[in-house]
C-alpha cells in the first residue's frame, strides 16, 4: 500500500494538525500487526532520511504518529506507529455531542460556575458605595400631656 | 509674543472654522471614499494647503520616489530660486549655521531639529531620532513661553515661503519634544494630579499660564491618568478604563469607563473645546475585535489637531498605553494595538490613515520607548516578530497606513462607523465575535486549516529544521473517514429567571394621632428655652399643682430626633400643658407619628464578571446609621441595585432600615434591621438615670458581643473564611456620633489568573453542545462517540483524550 511520509510540529492534542507531506512511498506491513499500532516497512530514502514523525495511511483511513524508526537490512526502515485518533476521526469527534467541562472560548464557557479552580490572592480590595441620602437633619421633639 | 494657545494650533483655528462651515456637522466618515469625496474639493482656506501638501508628500513617500526634491525658497533678502533640499539639509546641519524659530530659545542647537525635520519633510522620516533629539533639547527649555513660530530661519534668513508642511512638522516635533523633554526631566511628575474616580470631572488646579506650561499641565493630567495605570487602576472599578482628553480641554476632562467585557449598548462620548470657545462634540468608537475582547479604549475626535490617548488592556490583563497624534487632518485617528508581542494586531479602529503614532508599555518607564506605529510594528519584534523589518527611514504616514494594510488586510473594513454628533448616541459593541486567539481566517475555515504553517510548533517533537528546507509542500490531510453524521445538536442555553410575582413593597406609614391625650411638637432651641422658663414660673406652678405633683410632669418626653429631609409638621401653635396653654411658648405640631427616609439606591456592579464576584470570594456589608454594620449576602445583591429606606417613629425614635434589591427587573425587600435614632434628653432626674441605665445596658451587650465575636473568630480560623464584625449594636446616643449616611462595603478578592489561562486550561462550561461548536482548548465531562467508525481501543483513547483536554 502507499503511505505518505509526513512531518508535523503540532500538539498531539490538536484535531487539526499542520502536516507537511514529504513523500508518498510504498510500504508493507511487518509481520502480524494491528491497525492501532502498526509497523510499516519502507525503503530508505536519503532525501528524507529519518526526519519524519507522521504517517498518513489513506488505505486505512488513519493517520499515525511515528513512535520509532528501526533500520533494517536491505536499506529498509521499519516504522513503528500509533494511531492519531484525534486527527483520524476528527469529523466524527466534531459531530459528537458532549458535556463540556472546560472550554477556552467565552461563548461556551460559563465563568459563573465556581469549580474551585479560581486562584485568588490573599489581599482584598475594599470598595465603598455610599447612598445618596441619610439622616441629614435633627429636631427636638416635645411630647406634652393633653392637647 | 504671547499667543499661548494659538501656538498650539495657530492657523488651525481658522482652518477648523472654515472646515466646520464647509462641512457642518458632517465631518466624520465611514470610509475612505466618503472622506475623499468630502475632502477632494476642499476649498482653499487658511491652512488648507497643509493638507494638500501633506497628502501629496505622503503620497510621494508611499511611492518611494524622490528622496530629495528641490524646494523653492525665498529669503528675506530676495528670492533664491530653487533651494535644493540636499543643500538646505547640508546648511542647517552645519555647525556653522544658526537655525532658530521665533519664540524659541535660540541658544539651543535647533539646527539638528530642523535638519531632521527637513529630512522628514523630504521623505526621510526619522521621527524617533528626531523626537529623541527634541526631547533632550526641550528639557532645557521647559517652562519657557512658546510664542508664534511662523517664521523659520536658516543662517539668519527667513524662509518666508518654506512650506507649511515643513514648519508644521517642525512645530509638531518641537512641541512633542518639549513634552517629552519635560517628562524626561521629571517635570511632569511634579505636576501629576490626584487619582480620579470614574466619571469624575477633573479640574486642573490653577492652570499655569503660558502655552508651554499649559501644554505641560495637559500632559501632566494625561500622565496622571494614562501613564500611571498602576495608580489609576487601584480602583476596582477601573478594570476597563478608557480616558480621552483633548489638548484643548485644559479646563476639564472626563474619565469615561466602558466596561466592554460584555456586548451591549454603550454611550460613547468625547469632547473637546476649540480655542474660539465653540464647543464641539464628536463621537467615535473603536470596535472591539476578537483579540481584544478584554481590552478597550477610547475615543472620539473632531476637527482638531489634538492628541489622543487611551489605555488598552490585553487578554493577559496587561495594560498598555497607546498614544497617537493626528497629523492636523482632524480625522478620527484611532489605533488600538494589541501589544503583547505574540499575536497579530487585533484591532484597528476608524483610521483613514494612521498618522504617526507612538506606543509604549505602561507601568514601566514612560517615554523611554517611543516608536512610531510603523516603526514599532515593523522594526520591533515586540509587536510583530514575524514581520520583516523595513527601512523605516522611508516611511511616512501613508506608508504606515499601507503597512497596516499589508499586515492586517481589511483593517479599514473592520472599523465601525462613527456615530455622528450626538451626545446620547449609543453604539453596539459586538464583542466576542470570535474566540480569543482565533483569527477570522480560522473561523472562516471551520475545517481547521491553519493558514500559517508551523504556527503550532511543538517544541521538542522532532529535532532539526522545518521541512520547508527540503522542498516539502504543506498541506492538511483531510479526514477521509466520511460517515453520515447526525446534524449538530443545538440546545438553547437555559435562562432561568424568577417568574414575576406581586412584589412586596414597603408599606405606607399609618396616620395615627391621639390628639386629646398628648401633643407632639417640634420645637426649636429658643422655643425650648422659653418653655423651660415658663415651666418654672410661679404662675404656672400654682396652676399646675392641681393636676401634677411636679410641673415637669406635664412633659411626657423630650428627645432629639434625627431624620431625613423633612418631618410631617403642621403649623406653629401655642403649646398646651394639660389644660393650660403655655403663654408665649410655641412649637410646630407634628401631624403624623411616622416618617421615613429614602436613602436612594446604589448599584453594585460586577467586577470580575465571573464567579469571583460572588461568595465565598466577595463579601458585602452595609453600614446603617443608628444600627451599625450588617452583613449582606453578596449573591443576592451583586449585579443589582441596593435600595434603602428607613421608617421612623417620631414619638419614640424607633427606626427600621428596610433594604431591598432591584435586579433582573424585579424589586425585592430582603433585609430589615431595627434601631433608634432619637437621643433622649433628660428632663427629670429619673429620666437621666433611665438614659444612663439604657446606655450601660447597651454597653454590656456590646461587650458580650465582643467576647462572643472573639470566640467566633478563633473558631472561624479553622474554616475557609474568617468571620468578623465591624461593630456591635449601639444605642441612639452613641449612634449620633456615627456617620449619618449609609454605605455599603464590598470586599473583593484579587483574582490571579495565569497568562493565557483559558488557552491552556479553559474556563468552566458544564454545557452540552456538539464538539464542533467548540474551539480552542476543550475538556469534556462525557461524550457519546456512536457515530465514529473506529475500533473500541481507539474509541477509548479518544474518550480519554477528550476528558484530558484537546484543542479543537
Image (cartoon, rainbow, N blue to C red):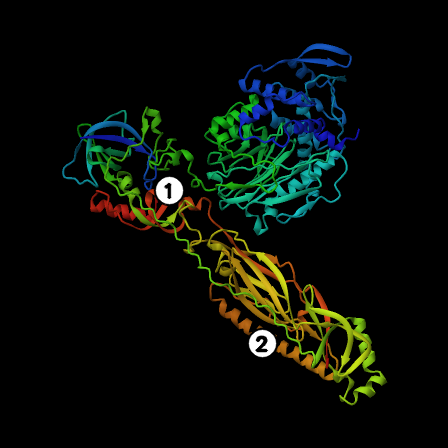
Give the spatial CA distance, label 2 vs label 1: 58 Å
Please give the name of the residue rendered at 71% of the width and 72% of the height, measured from the top-left corner.
B590
Residue B508 visible in the displayed image: yes
Which secondary structure, mark 2? helix
Q: Residue furthest top?
A: B81
10 Å neighbourhood of mark 1: few (<14), some, or many (≥20)?
many
Callout 2: residue from which chain?
B
Q: Nearer the viewer, residue B778 or B594?
A: B594
User: Residue B497, which numbered label?
Assistant: none
* Image marks 2 and 1: residues in contact by CB distance under 8 Å: no
The image position of residue B101, as x and y in percent, is 74, 24
Residue identified by numbered label 1: B775
Label 1 SS? loop
The one of B298 and B220 positioned closer to us in this rendering: B298
Residue B704 badge: 2
Q: Is residue B307 above or below residue B55?
A: below
Q: Quadrant of residue B701?
A: bottom right
Image quadrant in which you'd find residue B562: bottom right
Q: Quadrant of residue B450?
A: top left
| Quadrant, the C terminus of chain B | top left
- Determine whether B671 is above or below B227 in the image: below
Pinpoint residue B296: horizontal percent, then vertical percent. 54, 41
Camera-near label (2 vs 1) is 1
Can see residue B186? no
Discs 2 and 1 carry the same chain letter: yes
Q: Earlier in the sequence, mark 2 or mark 1?
A: 2
The image shows residue B666, relative to residue B761, as above or below, that is below
Of all chains, the one bearing label 1 is B
**Viewer-side residue, B384 vs B768:** B768
- For residue A65, side relative to residue B407 (left or right): left
Amino acid at each position: 500500500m502507499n503511505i505518505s511520509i509526513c512531518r508535523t510540529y503540532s500538539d498531539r492534542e490538536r484535531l487539526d494538525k499542520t502536516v507537511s507531506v514529504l513523500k508518498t512511498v510504498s510500504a508493507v506491513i511487518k509481520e502480524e500487526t494491528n491497525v492501532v499500532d502498526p509497523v510499516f516497512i519502507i525503503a530508505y530514502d536519503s532525501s528524507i532520511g529519518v526526519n519524519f514523525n507522521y504517517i498518513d495511511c489513506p488505505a486505512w483511513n488513519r493517520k499515525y504518529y511515528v513512535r520509532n524508526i528501526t533500520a533494517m537490512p536491505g536499506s529498509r526502515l521499519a516504522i513503528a506507529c500509533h494511531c492519531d485518533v484525534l486527527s483520524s476521526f476528527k469529523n466524527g469527534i466534531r459531530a459528537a455531542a458532549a458535556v463540556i467541562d472546560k472550554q477556552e472560548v467565552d461563548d461556551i464557557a460559563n465563568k459563573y460556575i465556581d469549580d474551585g479552580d479560581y486562584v485568588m490572592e490573599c489581599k482584598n480590595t475594599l470598595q465603598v458605595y455610599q447612598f445618596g441620602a441619610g439622616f441629614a437633619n435633627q429636631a427636638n421633639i416635645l411630647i406634652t400631656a393633653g392637647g | 509674543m504671547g499667543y499661548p494657545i494659538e501656538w498650539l494650533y495657530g492657523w488651525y483655528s481658522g482652518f477648523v472654522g472654515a472646515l466646520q462651515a464647509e462641512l457642518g456637522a458632517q465631518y466624520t466618515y465611514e470610509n475612505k471614499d466618503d472622506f475623499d469625496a468630502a475632502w477632494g474639493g476642499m476649498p482653499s482656506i487658511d491652512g488648507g494647503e497643509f493638507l494638500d501638501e501633506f497628502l501629496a508628500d505622503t503620497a510621494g513617500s508611499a511611492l518611494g520616489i524622490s528622496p530629495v526634491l528641490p524646494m523653492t525658497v525665498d529669503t528675506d533678502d530676495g528670492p533664491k530660486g530653487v533651494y535644493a533640499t540636499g543643500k538646505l539639509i547640508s546648511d542647517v546641519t552645519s555647525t556653522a549655521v544658526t537655525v532658530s524659530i521665533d519664540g524659541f530659545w535660540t541658544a539651543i542647537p535647533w539646527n539638528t531639529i530642523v535638519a531632521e525635520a527637513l529630512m522628514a519633510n523630504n521623505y526621510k522620516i526619522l521621527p524617533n531620532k528626531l523626537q529623541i533629539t527634541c526631547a533632550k533639547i526641550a528639557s532645557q527649555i521647559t517652562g519657557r513661553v512658546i510664542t508664534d513660530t511662523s517664521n523659520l530661519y536658516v543662517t539668519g534668513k527667513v524662509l518666508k515661503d518654506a512650506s507649511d508642511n515643513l514648519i508644521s512638522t517642525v512645530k509638531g516635533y518641537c512641541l512633542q519634544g518639549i513634552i517629552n523633554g519635560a517628562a524626561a526631566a521629571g517635570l511632569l511628575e511634579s505636576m501629576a494630579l490626584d487619582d480620579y474616580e470614574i466619571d469624575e470631572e477633573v479640574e486642573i488646579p490653577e492652570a499655569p499660564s503660558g502655552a508651554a506650561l499649559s501644554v505641560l499641565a495637559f500632559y501632566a493630567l494625561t500622565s496622571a491618568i494614562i501613564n500611571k495605570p498602576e495608580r489609576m487602576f487601584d480602583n476596582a472599578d477601573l478594570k476597563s478604563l478608557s480616558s480621552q482628553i483633548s489638548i484643548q480641554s485644559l479646563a476639564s476632562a472626563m474619565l469615561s469607563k466602558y466596561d466592554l467585557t460584555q456586548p451591549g449598548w454603550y454611550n460613547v462620548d468625547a469632547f473637546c473645546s476649540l480655542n474660539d470657545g465653540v464647543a464641539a462634540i464628536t463621537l467615535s468608537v473603536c470596535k472591539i475585535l476578537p483579540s481584544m475582547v478584554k481590552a478597550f479604549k477610547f475615543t472620539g475626535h473632531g476637527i482638531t489637531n489634538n492628541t489622543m490617548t487611551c489605555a488598552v488592556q490585553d487578554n493577559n490583563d496587561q495594560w498598555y498605553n497607546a498614544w497617537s497624534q493626528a497629523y492636523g487632518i482632524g480625522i478620527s485617528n484611532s489605533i488600538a494595538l494589541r501589544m503583547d508581542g505574540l499575536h497579530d494586531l487585533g484591532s484597528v479602529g476608524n483610521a483613514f490613515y494612521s498618522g504617526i503614532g507612538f506606543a509604549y508599555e505602561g507601568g514601566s518607564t514612560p517615554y523611554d520607548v517611543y516608536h512610531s506605529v510603523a516603526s514599532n510594528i515593523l522594526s520591533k519584534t515586540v509587536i510583530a516578530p514575524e514581520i520583516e523589518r523595513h527601512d523605516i527611514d522611508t516611511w511616512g504616514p501613508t506608508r504606515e497606513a499601507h503597512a497596516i494594510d499589508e499586515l492586517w488586510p481589511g483593517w479599514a473594513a473592520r472599523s465601525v462607523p462613527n456615530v455622528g454628533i450626538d451626545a446620547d448616541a449609543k453604539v453596539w459593541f459586538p464583542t466576542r465575535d470570535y474566540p480569543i486567539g482565533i483569527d477570522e481566517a480560522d473561523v472562516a475555515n471551520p475545517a481547521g486549516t491553519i493558514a500559517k504553517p508551523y504556527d503550532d510548533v511543538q517544541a521538542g517533537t522532532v529535532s532539526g529544521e522545518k521541512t520547508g528546507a527540503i522542498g516539502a509542500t504543506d498541506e492538511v490531510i483531510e479526514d477521509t473517514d466520511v460517515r453520515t453524521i447526525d446534524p449538530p445538536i443545538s440546545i438553547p442555553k437555559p435562562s432561568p429567571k424568577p417568574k414575576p410575582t406581586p412584589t412586596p413593597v414597603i408599606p405606607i406609614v399609618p396616620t395615627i394621632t391621639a390628639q386629646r391625650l398628648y401633643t407632639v411638637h417640634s420645637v426649636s432651641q429658643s422655643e425650648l428655652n422659653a418653655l423651660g422658663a415658663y415651666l418654672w414660673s410661679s404662675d404656672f406652678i400654682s396652676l399646675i399643682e392641681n393636676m401634677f405633683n411636679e410641673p415637669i410632669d406635664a412633659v411626657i418626653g423630650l428627645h432629639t430626633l434625627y431624620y431625613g429631609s423633612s418631618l410631617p409638621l403642621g403649623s406653629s401653635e401655642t403649646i398646651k400643658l394639660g389644660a393650660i396653654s403655655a403663654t408665649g411658648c410655641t412649637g410646630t405640631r407634628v401631624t403624623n407619628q411616622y416618617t421615613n427616609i429614602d436613602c436612594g439606591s446604589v448599584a453594585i456592579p460586577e467586577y470580575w464578571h465571573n464567579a469571583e464576584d460572588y461568595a465565598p470570594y466577595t463579601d458585602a456589608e452595609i453600614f446603617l446609621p443608628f444600627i451599625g454594620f450588617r452583613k449582606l449576602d453578596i449573591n443576592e445583591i451583586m449585579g443589582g441595585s441596593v435600595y434603602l429606606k428607613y421608617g421612623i417613629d417620631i414619638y419614640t425614635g424607633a427606626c427600621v432600615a428596610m433594604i431591598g434589591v432591584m435586579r433582573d427587573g424585579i424589586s425585592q425587600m430582603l433585609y430589615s434591621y431595627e434601631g433608634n435614632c432619637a437621643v433622649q434628653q433628660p428632663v427629670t432626674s429619673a429620666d437621666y438615670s433611665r438614659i444612663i441605665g439604657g446606655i450601660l445596658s447597651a454597653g454590656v451587650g456590646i461587650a458580650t458581643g465582643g467576647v462572643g465575636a472573639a470566640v467566633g473568630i478563633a473558631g472561624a480560623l479553622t474554616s475557609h473564611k474568617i468571620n468578623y464584625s465591624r461593630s456591635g449594636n449601639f444605642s441612639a446616643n452613641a449612634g449620633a456620633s456615627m456617620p449619618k449616611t449609609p454605605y455599603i462595603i464590598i470586599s473583593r478578592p484579587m483574582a490571579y489568573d495565569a497568562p493565557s489561562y483559558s488557552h491552556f486550561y479553559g474556563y468552566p462550561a458544564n454545557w452540552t453542545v456538539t464538539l464542533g461548536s467548540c474551539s480552542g482548548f476543550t475538556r469534556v465531562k462525557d461524550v457519546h462517540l456512536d457515530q465514529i467508525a473506529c475500533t473500541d481501543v481507539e474509541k477509548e483513547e479518544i474518550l480519554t483524550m477528550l476528558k484530558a483536554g484537546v484543542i479543537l
